[in-house]
Image (cartoon, rainbow, N blue to C red):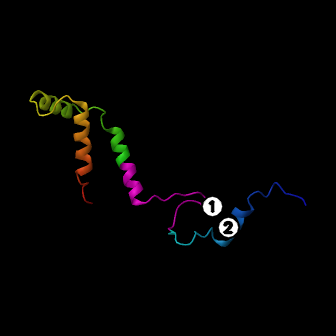
Amino acid sequence: MKIDGTRADLLGGALDRVGGATPPAGTRSTPSSAPVGADRVDLSSEAQLLQVALRAAEQAPDIRPDVVERMRAALDRGEIGNDPDRMADALLDHWTTTKPPQR
């Protein structure tokens, strides 16, 4: 049997002749400007929202001076102490008992 190296794209040519690949059952098929046979990724709305949130988090400053000043003032007033274990417990209690915002 002879293998012809000049006909490497037999599948692509066949798909062009029959109108392209058929998407797997249960998936959406939407028209695209991508050429037939090109790879394509469609992100869910949740994944797109996550990307926006990650970009916003990357652009946020590592240190927020307004929060630092507020905490210093609360420490000076004695509203919070300097016991790291107690503060860690309070933070965990806050984040585990606070309900997330509803969408």
Q: Are discs 2 and 1 less than 8 Å apart at CB? A: yes
> Toward the viewer: 54 or 70?
70
Q: Secondary structure at mark 2?
A: helix
N-terminal of the two: label 2 or label 1?
Answer: 2
Callout 2 environment at 10 Å: few (<14), some (14 to 19), or many (20+)? some
Which residue reaches farthest right?
1
Q: Amino acid at mark 2?
A: Leu
Taking the spot 14% from the left edge, 29% from the top edge, the residue there is 75
User: Residue 64 appears in which quarter of the rendering?
Assistant: top left
Q: Amino acid at mark 1?
A: Gly
Distance Cα–Cα, label 2 vs label 1: 8 Å
49 part of magenta stretch: yes
Residues in magenta, as a range = 30-52
Taking the spot 25% from the left edge, 31% from the top edge, the residue there is 84
Q: Which residue is mark 2?
A: 15
**Residue 57, which numbered label?**
none
Q: Position of residue 97 (x, y in %)?
A: 23, 51
